[in-house]
């Protein structure tokens, strides 16, 4: 399967922008609301990647999952670096191990959104002009 990197990067950018916006807006600490934001952002980022890649639903799910995992890896690297600077080696190791375990969970909303996006693009039909002659 060929990877459409422009769709993956676009899905990642959408995920990143929505993550920053929700981080600025949301200041609470209820776990259910955090999971709702996390899931919604992943679905929307995957939706963009899947819509851009089009094709089969499987291809859209694959690209949506890659977009969210790519973003998660970058944010994990940033979190690990800042933890290393401010807390030390042992907490950094914990952040890295937990972050790597969570990558599969980050891929699920992105894959779901990617599948929906490629399905939606496949459902679009071109409009025919009635009475037009070629």
Image: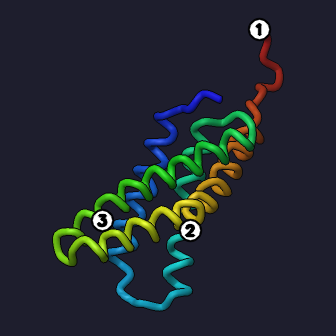
Which residue is located at x 64 percent, y 53 percent? 111
Q: Earlier in the sequence, mark 2 or mark 3?
A: 2
Quadrant holding the N terminus: top right
Foreground disc of the pair 2, 1: 2
- The residue wearing badge 3 is 80
Mark 2 secondary-structure assignment = helix
* Distance from Cα at disc 2 to Cα at disc 3: 24 Å
* Picture residue at 42% right of the left edge, 63% below the top: 18
Distance from the alpha carbon under mark 2 to that under mark 1: 45 Å
SS assignment at label 3: helix
Task: Answer whether labels 2 and 3 touch (C-beta < 8 Å).
Answer: no
In this rendering, would 127 be left or right of 108? right
Report the residue marked by disc 1: 134
Residue located beneath label 2 in the image: 40
**Residue 103 % position (x, y):** 52, 61
Q: Is residue 20 left or right of residue 67?
A: left
Which label lies toward us, 1 or 3?
3
Residue at the extreme left: 85
């Amino acid at each position: 399967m060929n990877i459409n990197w422009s769709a993956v990067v676009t899905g990642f950018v959408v995920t990143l922008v929505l993550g920053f916006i929700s981080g600025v807006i949301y200041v609470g600490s209820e776990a259910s609301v955090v999971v709702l934001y996390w899931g919604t952002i992943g679905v929307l980022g995957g939706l963009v990647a899947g819509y851009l890649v089009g094709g089969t639903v499987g291809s859209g799910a694959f690209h949506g999952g890659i977009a969210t995992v790519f973003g998660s890896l970058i944010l994990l690297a940033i979190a690990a670096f800042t933890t290393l600077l401010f807390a030390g080696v042992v907490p950094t190791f914990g952040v890295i191990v937990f972050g790597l375990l969570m990558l599969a969970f980050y891929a699920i909303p992105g894959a779901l959104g990617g599948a929906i996006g490629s399905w939606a693009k496949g459902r679009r039909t071109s409009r025919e002009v009635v009475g037009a002659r070629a």
